[in-house]
Image (cartoon, rainbow, N blue to C red):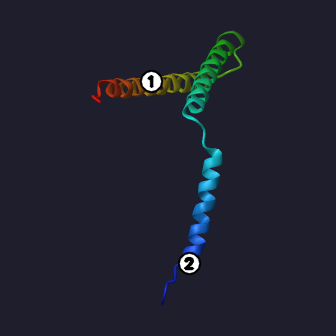
Amino acid sequence: MKIVIDSKAINNDLSNFGGVKAQREKSFSQVLKDALESVNTYQNEYETALYRHLFMDDVDLHDVVIAGEKARLSLELTLQIRNKAMEAYQEIMRMQI
């Protein structure tokens, strides 16, 4: 049994993949902005769920806890990204030219 590799098909697929990738790429600042907006959304969802559980009693406690954990984890991830960015900046500033 012989296996034949069609290099033209592979190159076409790779070039198409690269074109799609370039169209979908976002800038680093846009990715950070989207991440911060999602953190804010999770925080607001948690506050709403907590309020509704305490005063309207139409949200279960486990839903409040899940919303709180989502908010906590997203904030923790944001802080870790900030810390890594600060470490990278400080390392660049320590470099000698």
The residue closer to the viewer here, 15 or 50, is 15
Does dot 1 land on a helix, a strand or a loop? Answer: helix
Residue situated furthest bottom in the rendering = 1
The C terminus lies in quadrant: top left
In the rendered view, tell whether residue 9 sits above or below residue 64: below
How packed mark 1 is, by other alpha carbons closer than 10 Å (few <14, some 14-19, many 20 or more), is few
Which disc, if any, is residue 82? 1
The residue closer to the viewer here, 34 or 86, is 86
The residue closer to the viewer here, 29 or 48, is 29
In the rendered view, tell whether residue 74 sits above or below residue 25: above
Distance, label 2 to label 1, CA atoms, is 46 Å
Query: Residue at point 58% right, 74% down?
Result: 8
Can you tell which quarter of the image residue 79 is in? top left
Residue 37 percent across, percent down from the top left: 62, 24
Residue 75 percent across, percent down from the top left: 50, 22
Q: Is residue 71 left or right of residue 54?
A: left
Residue situated furthest top in the rendering = 55
Residue 53 percent across, percent down from the top left: 66, 15
Which disc, if any, is residue 6? 2
Residue 83 percent across, percent down from the top left: 40, 23
Indicate the amino acid at tag 1: Arg
Indicate the amino acid at tag 2: Asp
* Upstream in sequence: badge 2 or badge 1: 2
Can you tell which quarter of the image residue 15 is in? bottom right
Query: Residue at point 56% right, 70% down?
Result: 10
Q: Nearer the viewer, mark 2 or mark 1?
A: 2
Does dot 2 land on a helix, a strand or a loop? Answer: loop
Q: Is residue 83 left or right of residue 97?
A: right
How packed mark 2 is, by other alpha carbons closer than 10 Å (few <14, some 14-19, many 20 or more), is few
